[in-house]
Amino acid sequence: MSSEASFDLVVIGTGPGGYVAAIRAAQLGLKAAVIEREHLGGICLNWGCIPTKALLRTSELYLTLEHAERYGISVSGLSFDIQKIVQRSRGVAKQLSAGVAYLMKKNKIEVIEGEARLLAPGRVAVKGQDAGEREIQAKHVIIATGARARTLPGLEPDGERIWTYREAMVPAAMPASLLVVGSGAIGIEFASFYRALGAEVTVVEIMDRVLPVEDEEISALAQKAFAKQGMTIQTGTQVEKLEVTAAGVTASLKGSDGAGSEITVERVILAVGITGNVEGLGLEALGVKVERGHIVIDEWCRTGAEGVYAIGDVVGPPWLAHKASHEGILCVEKIVGLDNLHPLDTSRIPGCTYCTPQIASVGLSEAAARDVGREVKVGRFPFQANGKAIALGEPEGLVKTVFDAKTGELLGAHMIGAEVTELIQGFAIAKTLETTEAELIESIFPHPTLSEMMHESVLDAYGRVINF
Amino acid sequence: MPIPILMPALSPTMEEGTLTKWLVNEGDNVVAGDIIAEIETDKATMEVEAVDDGRVGKILIGEGTENVAVNAPIALILEEGEDNAALAGFDAAAEPAAPAPPSSAQISEIIVEPAPEGTGPKPVVTNGQGGRPIASPLARRLASDNAIDLGALSGSGPHGRIVKRDVEKALDGGFEEVAGPKASTGQVMAPRSASAVPAMSDEDILALYEPGTYEVVPIDKMRRIIATRLTQAKQTIPHFRLEVDCELDALLAARKRLNAMSPADGPKSFRISVNDMIIKAMGMALQKVPDANATWTEHGILRHMGSDIGVAVAVEGGLFTPVIRHAEIKSLSEISNEMKDLAGRARERRLAPHEYQGGTTSISNLGMMGVKSFDAVINPPQATILAVGSGEKRPIVKGDEIKVVTLMSCTLACDHRVVDGALGAKLLTAFKGFIEEPVTMLV
């Protein structure tokens, strides 16, 4: 084992948590390095957020073209090539991964390839492809190793018939029928993609509604929209067993009423949550606590072991790239000792699901707000009353806002419909700036835009809606 | 050659002001540091101090003169050995001296006082950096709903912006505030409240009483603030108290004579109360024992220059403590009339925050309600509070004889971080001296 250079900060993992943390450290004058065992950019860029967005762009276009007649366009012989779709998605991922390599170079961050293991506080071993191990000195180590698909007993992926997101992203052929287990963001996005391209899709969700983290009203609208697209949704249902047969996979389902049923499909996608990549890092010896597959941290991402921090998916939900990036920045700024830092406020983390229709939200759902004892004012505005939505041919959706009735604090915003993932930042900014309904009401929204619905929703919460 | 006293500038942009009051007469001897006049603009009042010893030879600008130009001579001081002949040739029309730093007059303190309604700029509360406090809309609304003065908070948001959590912290009792509206003293934090033993939960309390045997009175903002601030005071300020009996007969006699002199009616009439004289005496005592006119902060002890006396006024559902500023230099009739105005408006809840914030001590007088003596809780961030009991005739031993005198028991509560026992005793003794020999308040 050869001894190596020493760094102020070493980040294990280069996903959106890790590489962003390294850049922030470099900006603040730290000598930083990143360790990556696979691809720069992590799951997000290579096997998550970005390549799926490329896939979903295709399915969205395909759906639009299927209805081209509505827009006065005649299209005949519409077809697709799944391999070209996958190819494009891989190309997008590759381009962005190369972008991260450039950013590392630009910020003079050393990229070390290999598997990292913590030897002791301040000492990290890296095992490269060539089996040689080198040791790195680091005053601070941030673990940003991310997560992988969770598996449940009886629900193990085989990579052939039973997929995780990983295989689902690079299908060799279009399955004729598909069972998606779990209706969180990952499950629903794949369900949406495959349904749009013609697969028979069944979604099974153990909770009583799809997208269980979203506002109940939004969940209900989403479920209705998916059903209309021809998806089969079974909520309150558990997959007990998957059996691979020559014909495909037979799943044994059990409803909340105890009634059993079976379904046979060509492929299954498991999307029942994720679990942190905590193995092989030498955490135990350092006394880093791991609970339910995730590293335990304090409000400043400290693990309790001297100089060892953890951020992003490996520390637990919400499993979102932007949450990881924010934690990475916060963690580094705390290490450097910047003033005026505040722990991550989860009520300000927006969440987006890129199914059709899109779903986006920030803050408390109406029910969650009531559960914590807030007296609320709720505003709603439907897409069908918005000029731009109608012009776009996207008249389905809702913008819902939840305010504290006493203080006017914007507690949450929940949207479903076209392009809402691009709209939610407006409410995220409003929350960070602590605007009340008054400033939102006074703001001038451009016409004609979808964003006008955000304004109208706020107006509606205060009994002042104009166009509905 | 006589030394001219020039009209001082209150601010770099001030061009003229009003000479409101002379505190000396021609012929009076002055020593450096004596306050000789008061000057004001629409925004502020300022005292003029003599820096040289001498005798007031001539007053060039009469009391009440408005629009006096900065650097115009307002009086002449004769140095030792000079006589009135040296004044020949000087009069009010004399050429203003060349602009120069006011060498024979200096600003002793700028007291920012509210402009009369409708004249000049309104006073603004700032967070010590000038301008309005920078706060998020939600923080503003929470502060206004809970009667929290934003100017008293420090912000934890970007660039010191006051955000929701800062207001919530203040509501929870973790006050961080400036010493009061005297923005010129800069922003100073009060200590954070030490973590206190949690009180009984509401559930535990309700369990002790049979439902239906009580009614629940909602807690209004005033009650909430009283509860928060006085809990904070009791939990964070190491209180100790000193008690003294003051003989009141001389003061009562003086008061009677003074009130007999008041015009029957009109703006100059007055009716001085015992409490007005207590305010004045406390103001004078703090000047005599300036170390006790102080406020504890983690950055350092604020030694206040003026005696700004908060006076507890009971109002429906709570109390206010409007502040008589500079009680040490105000006449009894001024204090009396100002107090009547403040107390009246306090009862109507029409006081502006700057009228009840930032005193340097407080007086709580329950004498008129027949209370013999009591102790009061310090009103943070002040260092002392004087609890005044009733004046009553009591037999005491004087020499070897029993005499009947009117006695008033006063209890001074002190913040031990700032005022130690001996210092508190000095303050209380000085106060007692002024009460028992009210004529000494004129010195």
Image (tube, coloured by chain):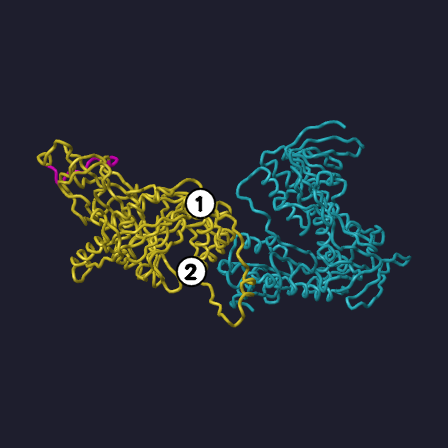
**Could you tell me residue A194's position as x and y percent?**
77, 57
Q: Which chain is yellow?
A: B
Residue topped by disc 2:
B222
Q: Which chain is cyan?
A: A
Q: Going by the image, does B261 lie left or right of A55? A: left
Furthest residue in direction top, as rendered: A2
Please say whether residue B430 is one of the residues in the magenta stretch: no
Which mark sits nearer the N-terminus, 1 or 2? 1
Say which amino acid is labelled 2: Met
Contact? badges 1 and 2 (CB < 8 Å): no
Q: Main secondary structure of the magenta part?
A: loop
**Quadrant position of residue B77:** top left
Residue at image position (74%, 37%) is A117
Please say whether residue B90 is one of the residues in the magenta stretch: yes
Residue topped by disc 1:
B189
Q: Residues within 10 Å of mark 2 (few under 14, many from 20)?
A: some
Q: Residues within 10 Å of mark 1 (few under 14, many from 20)?
A: many
Report the span colored magenta: B89-102
Q: Label 2: chain?
A: B
| Viewer can see residue A154 | yes
Say which amino acid is labelled 1: Met
Front residue (pair A296, B415) = B415
Relative height, residue A423 to residue A28 (above, below):
below
Q: Going by the image, does A294 lie left or right of A425? A: right
